Every structure is written in structure tokens, then in C-alpha cells.
Image: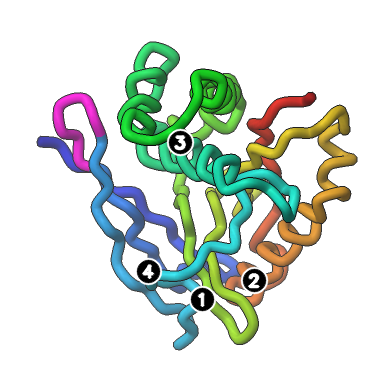
């Protein structure tokens, strides 16, 4: 067995204030098995933690009346990307999806939809970035006085010298441009909230960019 650790050094100016021990992945033959990361605290604040919480991150359809099936598709897509992004390829994609859906009531069209969503991730710039030597963390838990939940992905950009927040969306754009959907579904407000949440702990300017990784269909 082979283990690899990923850590993020949180910095304030040029001084390291905390190192997060993130999820460790153990290679077991052809699959990665996630090992829970440690609870962590910054400035006596539990904003970053490993508590069980109701997720506020919206990876599924942006419509408030979205069906539970659409939400389930988004959840499965997100989990496959999170757990298997290091080894995920077009060749093993179908097998991984089958492991998640074989006992569930998904139609062939819905399974094909999942394949399209994950294929878009594989073709994205983000997929290439995550295979580089960078600091990153999926499902970063946060908690403050008003909200608690998870940020889909945060990674450190060495060139920009700051953190980039990424939110995955499987929303159907319904003919809208990505810019229009960003406003229509208030994703811009969601990203701004995440940015403020992180910067409340790490200081202004610690987050240099917020992005949506669009995976859903255009029509």
C-alpha cells in the first residue's frame, strides 16, 4: 500500500499560522480510499472542522424546486470527482459510475448525464491543475455564528499567492450563458459568502479568485 498526504499551509502575510492536514488517500490496487482528516482550529474558531453538518454547497440543480433525483445526480458526480480525481479517466469513468448507481433507480439517460458531467471535469483546466504539485482541499467544512457547511474545493495558487475557491455546478443552463446563470441562481452571492468566510480567518486578500466549475448541460 502507498499513502500520500496533502497539506495546506495557511499564511498571514509571510508567516505560517497553521497547517491543515487534509484527506489522505491510500492506494488500494486500482482505487483510492479516503481517510478522514483531523479536526483543526484557527484562532480558537471552529470555522475549519470535520464535524458532521448539513451541506450548504449547491452542486446540484440551482432551481429551488429541483427534484431529489437531480440532487442525487449532482451528489454522485461530486463524490466521484472528490474521491477519484487522481485516477479518474475516460476509460474507468463508466465503471466508477456503475459502482454508485447499480442498486439505484437511475435511467440510462440519467447515467449518461453523469458521464457527460464528469467528462467535462476531465476536460477542464481544473482537472489538470489538481494533478500538479499544489495544496488543495475538497469539502472544506466551515462554521460561524450564522452558517455552517462545506466549500467544494479550495486550492493555493503559487503564482497568484493566494487561495482559489471552486464550486462545482451541475445546473442545466437552459440556454443561458454562464454569466447569466451566475446571476440568475445567485451563485455570485454564494461565492462572495465563501470568500468572506475564508478571509475572516486568513485576512483580506487571502482569497484571490472564486470560480464555478460548470459541469451541467447548456440546454
Q: Nearer the viewer, mark 1 or mark 3?
A: 3
Q: Residue at x 69, y 63 (%)?
A: 195
The reply to whether residue 128 is in sight is: no
**Where is mark 3, residue-wise?**
81
- For marks 1 and 3, the one nearer the N-term is 1
- In this rendering, the answer to whether 79 lies above or below 56 is above
What main secondary structure does the magenta stretch of the protein show?
strand
Q: Which of marks 2 and 3 is in front?
A: 3
Question: Spatial distance from mark 1 to mark 4, Cα to Cα?
Answer: 10 Å
Q: Residue at x 33, y 20 (%)?
A: 95
Which quarter of the rendered picture does the N terminus lie within?
Answer: top left
**84 vs 69, nearest the viewer:** 69
Q: Using a 10 Å C-alpha cutoff, classify the residue at mark 3 as few (fewer than 14 neighbours), some (14 to 19) or many (20 or more).
A: some
**Where is mark 1, residue-wise?**
47
- For marks 3 and 4, the one nearer the N-term is 4
On the picture, is 193 further left or further right than 41? right
Q: Residue at x 89, y 40 (%)?
A: 180
Question: Which range of residues does the magenta coloring cover?
Answer: 26-31
Amino acid at each position: 500500500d502507498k499513502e500520500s498526504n496533502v497539506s495546506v499551509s495557511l499564511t498571514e502575510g509571510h508567516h505560517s499560522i497553521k497547517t491543515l492536514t487534509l484527506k489522505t488517500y491510500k492506494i488500494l490496487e486500482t482505487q483510492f480510499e479516503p481517510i478522514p482528516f483531523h479536526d483543526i482550529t484557527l484562532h480558537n474558531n471552529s470555522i475549519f472542522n470535520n464535524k458532521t453538518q448539513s451541506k450548504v454547497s449547491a452542486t446540484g440543480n440551482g432551481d429551488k424546486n429541483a427534484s431529489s433525483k437531480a440532487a442525487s445526480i449532482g451528489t454522485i458526480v461530486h463524490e466521484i470527482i472528490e474521491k477519484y480525481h487522481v485516477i479518474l479517466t475516460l476509460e474507468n469513468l463508466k465503471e466508477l459510475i456503475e459502482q454508485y448507481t447499480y442498486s439505484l433507480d437511475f435511467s440510462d439517460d440519467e447515467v449518461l448525464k453523469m458521464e457527460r458531467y464528469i467528462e467535462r471535469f476531465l476536460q477542464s483546466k481544473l482537472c489538470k491543475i489538481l494533478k500538479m504539485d499544489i495544496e488543495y482541499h475538497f469539502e472544506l467544512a466551515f462554521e460561524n455564528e450564522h452558517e455552517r457547511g462545506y466549500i467544494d474545493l479550495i486550492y493555493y495558487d503559487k503564482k497568484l499567492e493566494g487561495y482559489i475557491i471552486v464550486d462545482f455546478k451541475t445546473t442545466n443552463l437552459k440556454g443561458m450563458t454562464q454569466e447569466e446563470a451566475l446571476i440568475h441562481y445567485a451563485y455570485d452571492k454564494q461565492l462572495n459568502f465563501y470568500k468572506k468566510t475564508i478571509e475572516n480567518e486568513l485576512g483580506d486578500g487571502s482569497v484571490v479568485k472564486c470560480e464555478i466549475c460548470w459541469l451541467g448541460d447548456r440546454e
